[in-house]
Amino acid sequence: MAKALKRMMVAEYESALEGLDGVIVLDTGPMTVEASQAFRRDLREKAGGARLKIIHNRTGRLALEHTLFGQDPAVLQEVLQGPCAIAYGGDGPIPIARVLREWKRKFKPLRVKVGVAEGEILAAGEVDGLADLPDMPQMRGMLLATVLGPARGLASSLQAVYGGIARALQARIDQQGGAGSDGNDEGGDGGSGGE
């Protein structure tokens, strides 16, 4: 392969991976064209627009070393052997791992090699474990519920206290025969409420 073409491919891979929080390297096995298209469609639809790209091992290694595997490029020497593809983008590695788990059940040759999530290199088993984690919108919701839970409890407690005070005052006013417009605490009509 010409050096200029290789540099262009590395630049293309790097621009596709720039700013991502994760990628999963896999071996798709001998997929038919129809299966490959269905797999790509599931990644786009179920993982928020994730993409699948078949990579050339040498150029892929260069791009991945400079982006996501910068802290441990030796991992790529072992992983990028034989046919390789990368699944990336969309809503991140967690929804991608869910789609991969679903596809591994129906297409046995599909195999995860390695992954990167939030800067951490993950073995194949750890990538499978990602599928059980909540994704970012779910985690944000859980965090928000955790943060707002005590505040919501305090607000309802205060509302109950002030509501109780208001009901007690209203009961006392009703017991005294209603609120007078003159503002006197004692006196008034001296009616049925006094002892």
Image (cartoon, grey):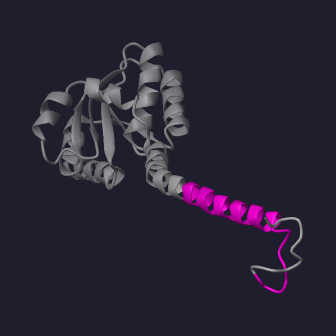
Q: Nearer the viewer, residue 132 or 100?
A: 132
Q: Nearer the viewer, residue 34 or 96?
A: 96
In the displayed structure, 178 sits above or below 68; it is below
Q: Residue furthest bottom?
A: 182
Q: Quadrant of the N terminus?
A: top left
Location of residue 129 in the rendering, given as x and y in whole percent from the top left corner: 33, 27
In the displayed structure, 46 sits above or below 191; it is above
Decide whether residue 156 is among the magenta residues.
Answer: yes
Location of residue 3 in the rendering, given as x and y in whole percent from the top left corner: 19, 49
Relative horizontal placement of residue 140, taking residue 113 as reference (left or right): right
In the displayed structure, 102 sits above or below 119; it is above
Query: Quadrant of residue 86 in the image?
Result: top left
For the stretch drawn in magenta, what is the main secondary structure? Answer: helix
Q: Residue at x 10, y 37 (%)?
A: 74
Which residues lie in the magenta part?
155-184
In the displayed structure, 50 sits above or below 31; it is below
Q: Residue at x 70, y 61 (%)?
A: 168
Location of residue 127 in the rendering, given as x and y in whole percent from the top left corner: 31, 29
Q: Residue at x 77, y 79 (%)?
A: 186
Relative horizontal placement of residue 82, taking residue 181 as reference (left or right): left
Q: Nearer the viewer, residue 54 or 107?
A: 107
